[in-house]
Amino acid sequence: MNIDIKGPKVFYEVPFDIPILGRLQISETLIVSWLVMIIITGLCIWLTRGLRVENISKKQAFAEMLVEMADKFVIGNMGEKFKYMIPFVAALFATSLVSNLISLIGLRSPTADLNTEAAWAIVVFTMITAQKIKTNGFGGYLLGFTKPIAVMTPFNFLSELATPISLACRHFGNILSGVVINGLIYAALGVASSALLGLIPGVVGNVLSHIPVLAVGVPAVLSVYFDWFTGVMQAYIFCMLTTMYIANAAEE
């Protein structure tokens, strides 16, 4: 096992000699993604233990509220015939939300890696395509690229490919921008703190100039937007677009 530390972030590279797959590299993104899945699984197990029909606990009431919210979200956007999509959309929202907010405890968000959103987008795109084929048949799906006129076929094909790309890049860009901006703010406050406190003469100024005093408190306030608000909104938007794309595919 080799552990390489590169730059300001820690990158775990664990090569395995697998004859079929070759060298399998496990990155920080993958490790934190596993942690996200463990957290969500643990919460689900905890929330669903000791369920009762009468005299329910606050924990059960909260769990039932989450289920009702997921039901209303999917049925409201997709209709009753897509009730089977509720577990998928709920799992997608929970994974996105926890992945976005896990940066609050100092871990690098998996959604700051385009590979994560790309994998989600490919799954959603596959479901959209399957729904179109189910609705129109394979021939009808291919014929749809020629509408309204045959000359539009290349553009319709590019528009189809743009769906997963836009899904992935929209989510990734917003999360990564928050990570970058927070990093720049920390660095700027550290430099400002060193310059300001360095004006104090003597040993006191020399010692305090190495302590990023200004970096304490201000980033926490800004994280209310960049971590909490943006994280929740991007998870909601990704799921909203997913339900809309799949529902529209059933009507084409």
Image (cartoon, rainbow, N blue to C red):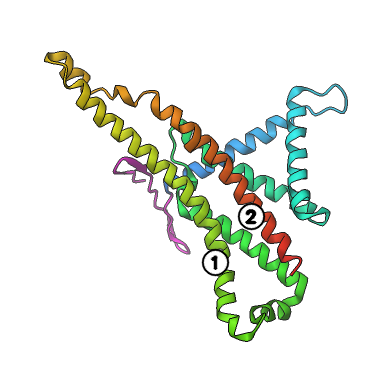
The correct choice, above or below, for 131 with respect to 208 in the image is: below
**Residue 241 numbered tag:** 2
**In the image as oriented, which residue stretches furthest toward the right?**
54
The picture places residue 135, in percent across and down from the top left corner, at 77, 70
> Is 242 one of the magenta-colored residues?
no
Q: Pick the residue in front: 32 or 232.
A: 232
Q: Mark 2 touching mark 1, by CB under 8 A?
A: no
Taking 155 as reference, is 62 above or below it?
above
Q: Residue at x 57, y 58 (%)?
A: 121
What amino acid is labelled 2 in the image? Leu
User: Which label sits on residue 205?
Assistant: none
Label 2 crowd (10 A; few <14 / some 14-19 / many >=20): some
Q: Is residue 8 magenta?
A: yes
Question: From mark 2 to mark 1, how far is it between C-alphas?
Answer: 13 Å
Q: Disc 1 residue type? A: Ala
User: Element under label 1?
Assistant: helix
The image position of residue 30, as x and y in percent, is 48, 47
The residue closer to the viewer here, 181 or 136, is: 181
Q: Quadrant of residue 10?
A: top left
Residues packed near mark 1 inside 10 Å, few (<14), some (14 to 19) or many (20 plus): few
Q: Which residues are magenta?
A: 1-26
- Most extreme residue toward the left is 202
Q: Which residue is disc 1 drawn over?
A: 162
Q: Which residue appears at 13% of the width and 14% of the height?
A: 203
Q: Look at the image and tell me whether residue 74 can be seen.
A: yes
Residue 224 falls left or right of residue 126: left
Quarter containing the C terminus: bottom right
